[in-house]
Amino acid sequence: MGRLNLLNITSRFKQSASLSGSILLSHPSLQDPNFCRSIVFLSNHSEDEGTLGVILNRPLGKKLIQLDDQFKHFALGQAEVYDGGPVEREKLIIAAWDWRDSSDSFRLYFGIDINKAESLRKENENIQIACFLGHSGWSPGQLEDELKLDSWVVSNLNLDLFEQMNEKAKCWKSAISGISDEMKLLADAPEKPWRN
């Protein structure tokens, strides 16, 4: 089996800007197969360097050990793997998070290596860990342009999204329906109405 390259994101993007830590919900009309009915967590957003995130609701149905046997000696070889997005799909991003005192506040460790992830798990058995193949990225100004076209709905971080990551479209539908009655109607429409 081949070796996955670990992608260290933290050195490539500045921590700042307004949308870092936000959730993007794809608009029901967005038909791009890379992002249709997706929920994207934005780990970094900068006017100068662009935006980076991972899709939360695209589980691959595989554990890390099934994708690369270099992880067979790690307890976290059993971590779930998700399709993080269309950019650098051969690269692996490991993320860990710990919910704080409320359902909308958490500490994130993003782009860490397997040793750091194992250490965090030893320190705190409640920490959640997931692995993402690839990521979602936008060049400077690109996401802002897509937001003006209503391709995305910006939402706040919340615990429910992270607890439903394995539920694919159901997770997206629940999140987008909570935005407004109009979004609920659009989300309830068939994906491909011409087939009805």
Image (spheres, grey):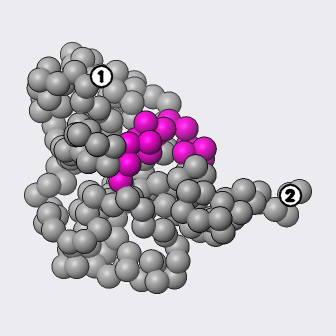
Magenta: predominant secondary structure element? helix
Residue drawn 29% across the image and 32% down it? 128
The residue lying furthest to the right in this view is 196
Q: What is the x, y in percent for residue 32? A: 57, 66
Q: Nearer the viewer, residue 1 or 96?
A: 96
Dividing the image into 4 quarters, which one contains the N terminus?
Answer: top left
Label 2 crowding class (10 Å Cα cut-off): few <14, some 14-19, many 20+? Answer: few
Residue at point 49%, 61% (across, down): 25
Report the residue at 31% width, 75% height from top: 139
- Please indicate, yes or no, whether residue 97 appears anywhere in the rendered image: no
Q: Amino acid at mark 1?
A: Gly
Relative to 135, say whether 2 is above or below. Answer: above
Q: Residues within 10 Å of mark 1 (few under 14, many from 20)?
A: many
Magenta segment: 157-171
Is residue 194 depicted above or below 171 in this figure? below
Q: Quadrant of residue 170?
A: top right
Q: Quadrant of residue 154?
A: bottom left
The secondary element bearing badge 1 is classed as: helix
**Which of the numbered marks, if any, corresponds to residue 24?**
none
Residue at numbered disc 1: 77
Q: Which residue is mark 2?
A: 195
- Is residue 28 a member of the stretch shown in magenta? no
Q: In the rendered structure, which amino acid carries the disc numbered 2?
A: Arg
CB-based contact (under 8 Å), mark 2 and mark 1? no
User: In this view of the protein, which residue sits in the foreground, 127 or 196?
Assistant: 127
Measured along the vertical axis of the image, is residue 47 above or below residue 29? below
Q: Is residue 148 left or right of residue 136?
A: right
Residue 160 sits inside the magenta stretch = yes
The residue furthest front is 101
Taking the image as drawn, is residue 22 in sight?
A: yes
Q: Nearer the viewer, residue 135 or 129?
A: 129
Which quarter of the rendering shows the C terminus?
Answer: bottom right
